[in-house]
Image (tube, grey):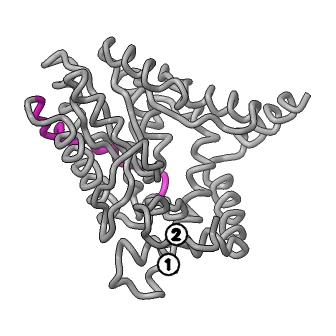
Amino acid sequence: MKEKIARIFLRFLESVPLPALASFCEWVMLLVHFVDRKHRRIARINLGIAFPEMGDAEADRIIRACYRQMGTSAAEFVHIPKMDAAYIREHFRIEGVEYTRESLEGRNQPAMVMTGHFGNWELLSHVYGKVIAPAAFIVRPLKSGILDRIVTERRECAGNTVIRKADSAKEVTKVLRKRILVGILIDQNVDRHKGILADFFTRKAYTTFGIARLALAMNAAIHPGFIFRDPARKFHHVLRFGPPLQIDPGAPRDEEVARVTRRCNEELEKAIREAPDQWMWFHRRWKTRPVGEPEIYEGLQ
């Protein structure tokens, strides 16, 4: 019954024109911004680490813009089933797709895209799957089974495949062998046993080493890929893919894993510096610290 009600409500939201729905969602998120002291504080700490020279007014502007864009992105996600070929042609531009095609088709090589919670990242995979070819990407299941099923349906409606994080290693290997592009978000904190310390802005951050290990194990290419929202036309986006990162399979394995992981962070940092208000600053990115180093987000658990 709950799922039926949720689906009816979702169909109602789909019937609301996107500009009106986005305005409502943005208004809701600005209310959240007003009361969500915890995540505003986390964002201020993160911005202070990334841009120590930034003034309070600019930091406040970026944080407010992040909340507003979360509302815009939510409205767009609701409307994904309505984003047909004509809509995509009008609202999206794709740059650098020849790089991923060269890896997958020209060199017949497994390929991954490293990205982050940047812009409306859900549309990155949707548009790629709709225009270029079906892709796969790793997700963390939602706590609500009802929401997880509904969200998964939208994520897969362009022919894409969702890979659950718990099963990711085995499933990603299978998908890569089929020469299907795999998207991996690399911008969240990980525990010490799941990553390595790598430079990220002005402080090192524990970063997943999974993508680097996979690339070395399968001779796979890693391409940076991000979706940028047009600041002047909020429903218009640019998908930008880059050439593969240089990987030396003959180098000492641990050293190469560390080097490739650093390069992934460099590409992510470059995108964030270009459009700092399009990254999700609310995550405790520098939470895991080396033993003995002080807690960065004390009191914000």
Task: Give coordinates of residue 269: x percent, y percent.
Answer: 30, 59
Q: Seen from this angle, which residue lies furthest right?
A: 1
Residue that badge 1 annotates:
61
Task: Give coordinates of residue 131: x percent, y percent.
Answer: 37, 27
Question: Which mark is drawn over residue 65?
Answer: 2
Question: Magenta segment range?
Answer: 234-249
What is the crowding at mark 2: few (fewer than 14 residues within 10 Å), some, or many (at least 20)? some
Task: Give coordinates of residue 251: x percent, y percent.
Answer: 9, 35
Residue 131 vertical placement versus 274 (above, below): above
Q: Seen from this angle, which residue lies furthest front?
A: 292
Quarter holding the N terminus is top right
Which sits in the foreground, 103 or 252?
Answer: 252
Q: Are marks 1 and 2 in contact (CB under 8 Å)?
A: yes
Taking the spot 36% from the left edge, 71% from the top edge, the residue there is 50
Kindly report the distance in space between the C-alpha atoms of the residues bearing marks 1 and 2: 6 Å
Q: Is residue 40 visible?
A: yes
Tell me if 266 is positioned left or right of 85 in this view.
left
Q: Amino acid at mark 1?
A: Arg
Q: Amino acid at mark 2?
A: Ala
Question: What is the number of callouts on the image?
Answer: 2
Residue 231 vertical placement versus 170 (above, below): below
Residue 2 among those drawn in magenta: no
Which sits in the foreground, 121 or 20?
Answer: 121
